[in-house]
Image (tube, rainbow, N blue to C red):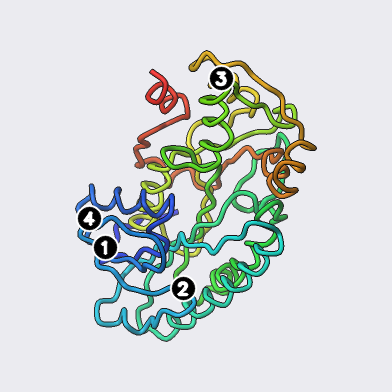
Amino acid sequence: MEMLDRTINDPLLLGGSGFVGSALIRYLYREGVPMQALQNRGLLPDHFGIKIHRGGLENFPWAQLEASPPSVIFHVARMAGKNEKDRQKAAQRNAVANRRLLNWMEKQADPPLLIFASGTLVYGSCGDAAVKEDAPLRPISFQRAYHQAEKPILEAQQAGTLPITIVRPGWIYGPGSQWFEAFYERPLLRQKRIPVFDKGQNWLSLLHVADAAGMMWHLAKHAPAGYVFNLWNGPPILQRDFADRLAEKTGARLISKSRRWLRWRYDAALAEAFSFSLKADTLYPDVWASYQARYPSVEHWLRERYP
């Protein structure tokens, strides 16, 4: 793959008040990149010099951007739902909103590059197999619903009508990570316990949120459009080994939590997510040769968080 050196002007961020979006704001600010963001709910940090557009994906008049067109749009926004029915409704609304964005892009003489964040749950649980970007899509867990919202973007990319890059991060950890804080740190703080879910023999492909942001920026700057990229750092790790390392760092004890318990306590989608096994790999190792990871593996972060 031939690497590029794009000039990026006023990148637009969709989903700036979320977990990954906030990390992108901090990353671009440190890089000295002026940015703009679409704000619907929540509060974006006001000390980063962000140009704010008010509105949501469903109703924003995209023509407003033509006065100061972005050369790149980072799309990390997603309407979520608390249960399967809500997720299906949110996905339908998301799909319509994504089509609106694509329709506007198609009308531009020089459409912006779209960097769209999906997730590795679209591959399904793959056991011990290494999974590259050409693997078949078999969405499970939350992605059963959310993949419906992504289909318009995936189809537009496959058609080659617009410059689109799709990223599929693994399990993203770091400050503000809901899955890590809810399922590991809270039991640690309250009970001095680290859970092992469904025997813990599933592979986790992990990625720090700072590197999720850095890798997306790296792709925007240097990778040609039209590709899908898996995002993760360091060798995949078994969930049981991940829990063991947390226990060693914190002095906590392990506690087993069955898949049945997860279904009873939460729902089937979450139980499936914590049993999901994926060893991320890539078709494009050369793309990452010039990328310097802030956290090359989860061990680097664990040493920092639990010194």
Q: Which residue is mark 2?
A: 57
Which tag, 4 or 3, sits closer to the chain's start?
4
Whole-angstrom CA distance, mark 1 to mark 3, is 42 Å
In front: mark 4 or mark 3? 3
Label 4 sits on what residue type? Phe
| Label 4–label 1 contact, CB within 8 A | yes
Q: Nearer the viewer, residue 163 or 25?
A: 25
> Where is 198 relative to 33, above or below?
above
The structure residue drawn at horizontal position 72% and vertical position 44%, both measured from the top left corner, is: 272
> Where is 184 relative to 139, above or below?
above
Q: Which residue is mark 1?
A: 35
Q: Which mark is residue 48?
A: 4
The structure residue drawn at horizontal position 70% and vertical position 55%, both measured from the top left corner, is: 139
In front: mark 2 or mark 1? 2
Could you tell me which secondary element the residue under label 3 belongs to? loop
Residue 74, how many percent across, how many down?
40, 62
Residue 142, how many percent across, how many down?
66, 54
* Left or right for 154, reference 209: right
* Left or right for 291, reference 179: left
Q: Which mark is residue 192?
A: 3
The structure residue drawn at horizontal position 33% and vertical position 56%, both measured from the top left corner, is: 221
Residue 193, how many percent across, how many down?
60, 21
Which tag, 4 or 1, sits closer to the chain's start?
1
Could you tell me which secondary element the residue under label 2 belongs to? loop
Label 2 sits on what residue type? Leu
Could you tell me which secondary element the residue under label 1 belongs to? loop
Q: Nearer the viewer, residue 294 or 225?
A: 294
Which tag, 1 or 3, sits closer to the chain's start?
1
